[in-house]
Image: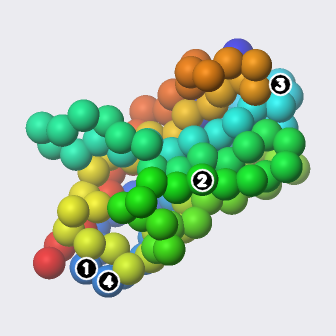
């Protein structure tokens, strides 16, 4: 079982930056692949970025590639999402999720943190 708590969201002007954090409690954090997703009002939740459990390899959606960076610190049981060059269309609730490496679906989700980008 993993509990996830996101933080770091807020209101920022277009072009600004934020660092989102996701603190995990529970055992064996390093054995979970971690991901960030977001959901804008009236839209479905979408994948943003992921980092693997073992090698730390990363993947990104095309809409954030080059602007967002996902990273993890296994010693702190924390995954980060550095979001730069923010655009109004990045406005959404951002969710952290954890997936056992043996599974394809994310099993554990945080409560989300709001990111609002003003133009």
Tell whether 103 sits left or right of 39.
Answer: right
Q: Nearer the viewer, mark 4 or mark 3?
A: 4
| Label 4 to label 2: alpha-carbon separation | 22 Å
SS at badge 2: strand
Q: Residue at x 60, y 47 (%)?
A: 50
Q: Which labelled disc corresponds to residue 14?
A: 1
The tag on residue 31 is none
Q: CA distance from mark 3 to mark 1?
A: 38 Å
Residue at the disc numbered 3? 27
Q: CA distance from mark 2 to mark 3?
A: 24 Å
Q: Quadrant of residue 90?
A: bottom left
- Furthest residue in direction front, as rendered: 62
Alpha-carbon neighbours of circle 2 within 10 Å: few (<14), some, or many (≥20)? Answer: some
Please tell me whether mark 3 sits on a helix, a strand or a loop: loop
Residue at (76%, 26%) from the top-left corner?
101
Q: Is residue 17 visible?
A: yes
Q: Which residue is mark 2?
A: 59
Q: Nearer the viewer, mark 1 or mark 2?
A: 2
Marks 4/3: CA–CA distance: 37 Å
Q: Residue at x 70, y 36 (%)?
A: 33
Q: Are marks 3 and 1 in contact (CB under 8 Å)?
A: no
Measure the alpha-carbon separation of dots 1 and 4.
4 Å
| Residue 84 image point, x, y percent | 44, 76
Examine the rendered structure and indicate whether residue 93 appears above or below residue 90. above
Marks 2 and 3 close (CB-CB < 8 Å): no
For the residue carrying disc 4, how many other residues have a C-alpha within 10 Å: few (<14), some (14-19), or many (20+)? some
Circle nearer the N terminus (4, 2): 4
Query: Nearer the observer, disc 2 or disc 3?
Result: 2
- In percent of width and height, residue 115 lies at 32, 58
* Residue assigned mark 4: 15
Name the mark nearer the viewer: 3 or 1.
1
Pick whichever, 10 or 64, lies toward us: 64
């Amino acid at each position: 079982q993993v509990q996830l708590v996101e933080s770091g969201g807020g209101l920022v002007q277009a072009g600004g930056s934020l660092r989102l954090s996701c603190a995990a409690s529970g055992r064996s954090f390093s054995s979970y692949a971690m991901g960030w997703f977001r959901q804008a009002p009236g839209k479905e939740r979408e994948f943003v970025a992921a980092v693997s459990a073992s090698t730390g390899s990363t993947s990104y959606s095309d809409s954030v590639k080059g602007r967002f960076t996902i990273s993890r610190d296994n010693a702190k049981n924390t995954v980060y999402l550095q979001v730069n060059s923010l655009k109004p269309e990045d406005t959404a609730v951002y969710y952290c999720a954890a997936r056992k490496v043996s599974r394809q679906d994310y099993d554990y989700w945080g409560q989300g943190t709001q990111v609002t980008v003003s133009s």
